[in-house]
Amino acid sequence: MISIRKYQPEDKPAVRHILIETSRLPVETEKDIKLLELLYNDYYTEVTPGYCFVAADEKDEAIGYIICAPDYKSFRRNFFKFYLPEIRELGMKYYTQAFMDVMGHALYAKKYPAHLHINVLNLCQSKGTGTRLMDALKAELRASGIKGLMLSCAADNDGAIRFYKKNGFKVLSVIGGGCMMAIEL
């Protein structure tokens, strides 16, 4: 039985593992792993853990998660100040990738101030886990008065795009291999 619960600090290693296991980006070096952790995990679990949820198995071990920054302006300010310098130390290609990823949300941030990342281990997909995670986050954002939620994914990730559309998201743009999607809450 899969349960959905709030993220807890002791979930961090499992959430990082899920991130690496499900990444569509190259994971060939320690720098690649560090980039993924800094760009797609650490800010959310460290700064906005109240907007992070875990799908846990019967042993209460994470098999999926959804993490969110509820306010893009705060996210960008803090990410650039505390996380981007650490990414810069990895090298210019990592810095550029992170910078572009963060700035990709800027165009839509006024209407959709929150953004998310969601990952579920492959063996646990197509069982409603992602939808349950999405429902938990949307309820939390609505309760906090957040009016819009966005995300980005690879434009060729047909399965993800179908999942997001099934959960009420619409495509805002497809640029440079990336697809921006959003939902009004």
Image (cartoon, rainbow, N blue to C red):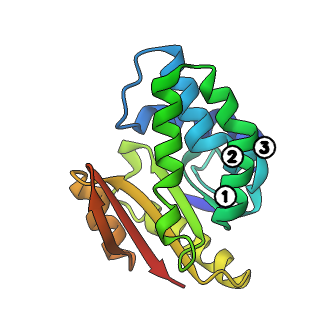
From the viewer's perspective, is 167 left or right of 108? left
Is 40 situated above or below 134? above
Q: Position of residue 168 (x, y in %)?
A: 38, 80
| Residue at which label 1 appears | 52
Question: Label 2 crowding class (10 Å Cα cut-off): few <14, some 14-19, many 20+?
Answer: many
- In this view of the protein, can residue 1 be seen by the observer? no
State the separation of the CA atoms marked 2 and 1: 17 Å
Instruction: Give the mark count.
Output: 3
From the viewer's perspective, is 175 left or right of 168? left
From the viewer's perspective, is 185 left or right of 166? right
**Residue ID at (39%, 75%):** 167
As helix, strand or loop, the secondary structure at mark 2 comes to helix
Is 102 situated above or below 98? below
State the separation of the CA atoms marked 2 and 3: 19 Å
**Residue ID at (73%, 60%):** 74
| Residue at which label 2 appears | 79
From the viewer's perspective, is 64 left or right of 156? right
Q: Position of residue 25 (x, y in %)?
A: 37, 33
* Observer-nearest of 50 and 124: 50
As helix, strand or loop, the secondary structure at mark 1 comes to loop
Residue type indicated by callout 1: Cys
Q: Position of residue 134 (x, y in %)?
A: 51, 68
| Residue at which label 3 appears | 9
Q: In the figure, residue 54 lies in which quadrant?
A: bottom right
Question: Label 1 crowding class (10 Å Cα cut-off): few <14, some 14-19, many 20+?
Answer: many
Disc 2, disc 3: CB below 8 Å? Answer: no
